[in-house]
Image (cartoon, rainbow, N blue to C red):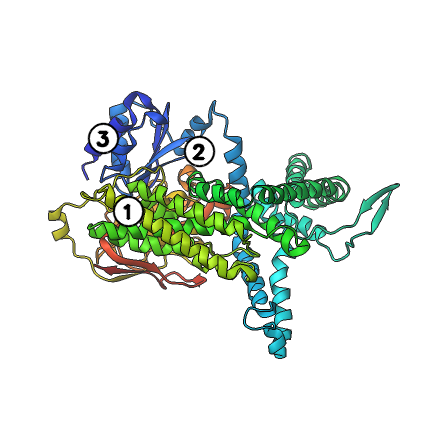
């Protein structure tokens, strides 16, 4: 990479006089700009040395890559004349004088709280769906399965207990997650949820509290009351931590926080917020009943654009309420948002497959095939950001299929009774009476989106010269290879290789990490580990290509050609090396299992940072396949990521 040239091209694209401040981390330039609309986005998207761009927290971030970003940054600073800044300084500059968008802030709040709960809700939901298959009449015969096979009755009852648990005790999970998000002790948040779902609470009974009748109605299935209660808990806990002497803080802060929150919850917060929750649910159900199929059709047409904004991350909070209202009180049709999401996802996948048949470009075909399959299974980011938005028309053609299929689903009042995979496998979550029409609607969505995309592309000769132009601000890098000159390609000989785990801990998919660069695989494919100890080991034999002064990231080029980035924590560059120790230098040769450095995990978490360790194959595009081992726990040195040469 010609670092000076890349810096000059970036300066030209963003505008020399448009830059307020600049910093960099292990992988990206972080800029605060006067006016983001002045950026020549097409120039950056078409730059082979720029791996992606996106906006976050008032910063315009440009993905360059490990080992190159610091050199590009140096030339960028020289050319623009801006003052060098740390990432923490940049954060302050970005927020100075700027009021955060309250809607997006609220969406992020809900996302932070509910996204971690989705696996539990999906597990409970699919168990509920499985029990519906066993107990529903007319599905496999005139009688239910448990009537035809009485021996399954006990199995059904056990499954029902398992399925209902995540929803009955939902306030406990919400309390724990919300407390973490609000900065309170998560176990105290869980205690608040436990109080609100205690078996001692009985509907119709009251406490006589100084002449005031306080309802003992339990808050099972509820979301909003516990959210507000835990928010109050967080305020009280912080207040007492600040004002109580350290000698009594440990004992009395939890006591006072819980008892005050408890009384406020049962007397005021709970009853009021339960009514608010019911009104919101009633309002959504009323809107659905009023607009009917037309409303579903409109929702289907705008769902994918909503995904681009990130607003869909707040939907699980609403979906839980809809499912709870249906399963507990037979109110509404269930989760219609899930139905629309499924139609939209399948439509985007179909458009991607249509593009695959239109193009003669091998790279686009390969990307479209994998992204299309992913979309049909409910994960649309690779299809939307990596393919459809690059060519523009497939994204919009897909909206037609989604709109029509959602309209038809609305006519037949198709609803989900559980969360699950919003795609072709979504029939597992749908009310058993609607499974057939659901599958038909999915097929309609696929057929229309495929046909419209294919016919439009064919009639407008869209892919005569198949060179896609990226248009999204946060596109998935699976769709973009690093630029490599032919001479360079001859010099590099890649081999099949297995990358070891660099740390002990719990394995996590990149898609589950809380950093857009890694979760959308902009830097390449790989996997993450939630560490259980703080020692980082070399995962391969090779040479240290990057060793940052901040000690939070390492780049290693293996002897077999894999370019491995080990990134310790999210935004931990802001710690400026505090709580980190490094044992290696750039250019140093290491063997698999050598200690690279250490991190104080507890200190990093107390400082407010996520310690997740990402292992990224930054030259993913040069491999035919990159995949990680599907295990829960892993030990450093164990086989972790497999790369297969083309």
Compared across the picture, whether 441 is left or right of 31 comes to right
Q: Mark 2 points at which residue?
A: 57
Image position, residue 42 (x, y; %): 27, 33
- Judging by the rendered image, the residue that carries numbered circle 3 is 9
Determine whether the residue tagged by mark 2 lies in a helix, strand or loop. Answer: loop
**Residue 17: x percent and y percent?**
30, 20
- Mark 3 and mark 2 residues within 8 Å of each other at the beta carbon: no
Which badge, 1 or 2, is on the more N-terminal residue?
A: 2
Among the 4 quarters of the image, the one containing residue 179:
top right
User: Could you tell which of marks 3 and 2 lies nearer the N-terminus?
Assistant: 3
Residue 455's label in the rendered image is 1
- The local secondary structure at tag 3 comes to helix
Is residue 30 visible to us here?
yes
Q: Quadrant of the C terminus?
A: bottom left
Q: Which class describes the residues within 10 Å of circle 1: few (<14), some (14-19), or many (20+)?
A: some
Q: 609 or 35: nearer the eye?
A: 35
Task: Estimate the spatial distance between the alpha carbons at disc 3 and disc 1, rounded to whole Å.
Answer: 38 Å
Mark nearest the camera among 1 and 2 is 1
Q: Nearer the viewer, residue 320 or 640?
A: 320
**Pointer 2 local density, CA inside 10 Å: few below 14, some 14–19, many at least 20:** few
Please tell me how crowded label 3 is: few (under 14), some (14-19), or many (20+) other residues with Cα within 10 Å.
some
The quarter holding residue 67 reads: top left
Ranked by sequence position, the earlier of labels 3 and 1 is 3
- Residues at marks 1 and 2, CA–CA distance in whole angstroms: 40 Å
């Amino acid at each position: 990479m010609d670092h000076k040239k890349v810096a000059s091209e970036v300066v030209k694209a963003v505008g020399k006089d448009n830059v307020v401040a600049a910093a960099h981390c292990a992988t990206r330039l972080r800029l605060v700009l006067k006016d983001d609309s002045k950026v020549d986005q097409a120039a950056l998207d078409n730059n082979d040395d720029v791996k992606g761009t996106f906006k976050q927290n008032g910063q315009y971030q440009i993905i360059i890559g490990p080992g190159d970003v610091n050199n590009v940054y140096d030339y960028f600073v020289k050319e623009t004349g801006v003052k060098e800044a740390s990432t923490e300084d940049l954060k302050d500059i970005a927020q100075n004088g700027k009021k955060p968008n309250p809607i997006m802030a609220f969406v992020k709040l809900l996302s932070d709280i509910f996204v971690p709960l989705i696996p539990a809700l999906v597990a409970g939901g699919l168990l509920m769906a499985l029990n519906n298959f066993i107990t529903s009449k007319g599905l496999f015969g005139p009688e239910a399965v448990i009537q035809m096979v009485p021996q399954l009755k006990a199995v059904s009852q056990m499954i029902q207990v398992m399925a209902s648990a995540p929803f009955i005790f939902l306030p406990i999970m919400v309390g724990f997650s919300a407390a973490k998000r609000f900065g309170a002790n998560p176990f105290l948040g869980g205690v608040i949820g436990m109080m609100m779902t205690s078996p001692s609470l009985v509907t119709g009974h009251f406490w006589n509290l100084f002449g005031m009748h306080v309802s003992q109605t339990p808050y099972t299935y509820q979301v909003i009351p516990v959210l507000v209660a835990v928010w109050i808990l967080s305020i009280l806990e912080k207040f007492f931590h600040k004002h109580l002497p350290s000698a009594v803080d440990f004992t009395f802060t939890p006591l006072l926080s819980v008892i005050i929150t408890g009384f406020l919850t049962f007397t005021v917060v709970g009853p009021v917020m339960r009514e608010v929750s019911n009104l919101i649910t009633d309002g959504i159900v009323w809107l659905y009943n009023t607009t009917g199929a037309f409303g579903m059709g409109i929702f289907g047409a705008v769902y994918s654009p909503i995904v681009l904004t990130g607003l869909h991350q707040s939907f699980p909070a609403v979906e839980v309420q809809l499912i709870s209202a249906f399963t507990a009180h037979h109110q509404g049709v269930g989760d219609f948002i899930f139905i629309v999401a499924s139609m939209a996802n399948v439509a985007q996948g179909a458009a991607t497959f249509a593009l695959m048949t239109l193009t003669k470009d091998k790279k686009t075909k390969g990307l479209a095939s994998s992204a299309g399959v992913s979309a049909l299974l409910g994960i649309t980011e690779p299809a939307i950001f990596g393919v459809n938005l690059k060519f523009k028309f497939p994204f919009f053609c897909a909206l037609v299929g989604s709109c029509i299929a959602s309209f038809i689903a609305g006519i037949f009042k198709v609803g989900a009774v559980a969360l699950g995979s919003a795609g072709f496998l979504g029939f597992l979550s749908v009310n058993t009476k609607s499974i057939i029409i659901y599958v038909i609607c999915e097929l309609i969505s696929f057929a229309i989106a495929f046909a419209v995309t294919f016919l439009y592309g064919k009639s407008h000769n869209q892919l005569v010269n198949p060179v896609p132009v990226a248009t999204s601000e946060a596109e998935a890098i699976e769709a973009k290879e690093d630029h490599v000159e032919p001479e360079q390609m001859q010099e590099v000989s890649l081999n099949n290789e297995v990358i070891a785990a660099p740390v002990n801990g719990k394995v996590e998919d990149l898609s589950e990490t809380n950093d857009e660069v890694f979760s959308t695989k902009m830097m390449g494919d790989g996997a993450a580990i939630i560490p259980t100890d703080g020692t980082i080991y070399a995962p391969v034999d090779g040479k240290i290509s990057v060793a940052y002064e901040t000690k939070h990231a390492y780049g290693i080029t293996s002897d077999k050609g894999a370019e491995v980035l080990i990134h310790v924590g999210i935004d931990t560059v802001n710690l400026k090396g505090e709580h980190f120790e490094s044992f290696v230098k750039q250019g140093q040769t290491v063997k698999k299992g050598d200690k690279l450095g250490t991190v104080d995990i507890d200190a990093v978490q107390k400082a407010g940072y996520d310690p997740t360790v990402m292992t990224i194959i930054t030259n993913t595009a040069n491999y035919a396949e990159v995949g990680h081992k599907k295990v829960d726990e892993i030990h450093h040195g164990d086989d972790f990521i497999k790369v297969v040469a083309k």
